Image (spheres, rainbow, N blue to C red):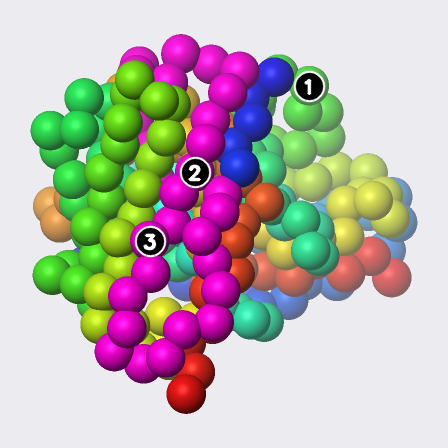
Amino acid sequence: QVQLVESGGGVVQPGKSLNLSCTASGFTFKDYALHWVRQAPGKGLEWVAVISFDGRRKHYLDSVEGRFSISRDNSKNTLFLQMNDLTSDDTAKYHCAKSSHEVPAADIDSWGQGTLVTVSS
Amino acid sequence: SFVLTQPPSVSVAPGQTATITCGGNNIGRESVNWYRQEPGQAPVLVVYDDSDRPAGMPERLSGSNSGNTATLTITGVEAGDEADYYCQVWDSSSDLMVFGGGTKLTVL
């Protein structure tokens, strides 16, 4: 079955950077768009970014545009999220999520358990 | 960008019907997806494309979408249905995904 396993979270100071990874298995990785969705403690779901199946299309939440960068390595079945200039508002659990189609607009049919990012001095 | 409005909480007795709404400007023109999230767990897709159910999802869960409101209906509510439920659309005018604020379903 589909498995999405995130890593790279941790405690980081404001203004610093962090790079998250998501290793996928159980499906043909290169055929699907992938998302990052975050959830601050006690809050709701917030979409962060999406990348198309071939990596050519990328879209971001306005508040992370220019600071975060989503990428993928289809040869290694891995999704990445490079996060720069982090602020306390970025504190959340970050979920890797698989679209049901190759395009970003479709529903999310699988989710990882998430990795926690805490931005604190 | 698109804004989705959900009631923060819905309470229902076992066996009754729970109705969770998701309001948005002309949301009926969009494809709405619904997710369930239990405490400490990852979300799970329960309804997609307004009213379709993923394989294995019980028929007790159904969705509809018209005008300015999308609705998730759970009939014969069970204790195991207690969870947070989120609606979601893709805002094609801004190329971004939008989630509603979530609704906590409590089974009395």
Question: Which-is-in-front pick, marks 2 and 1?
Answer: 2
What residue is rendered at 32% in x and 42% in y? A80
The residue wearing badge 2 is A22
Residue A19 magenta-highlighted:
yes
Q: Give, as a three-letter code, the residue at label 1.
A: Gly
The residue wearing badge 3 is A19
State left or right for residue B50 relative to residue A71.
right
Q: Give, as a three-letter code, the residue at label 3.
A: Asn
The residue wearing badge 1 is B56
Please report the bounds of the magenta region as a residue range.
A6-35
State left or right for residue B25 relative to residue B45.
left
Residue situated in front as seen by the camera: B95 or B51? B95
The residue tagged with tag 3: helix, strand or loop?
A: strand
State left or right for residue A111 relative to residue A121.
right
Residue B7 magenta-highlighted:
no
Q: Give, as a three-letter code, the residue at label 2.
A: Cys
The residue tagged with tag 2: helix, strand or loop?
A: strand
Residue B49 place in picture, x, y as percent: 41, 28
Taking the image as drawn, is residue B65 in sight? no
Residue A88 place in picture, x, y as percent: 37, 80
Q: Chain of mark 1?
A: B
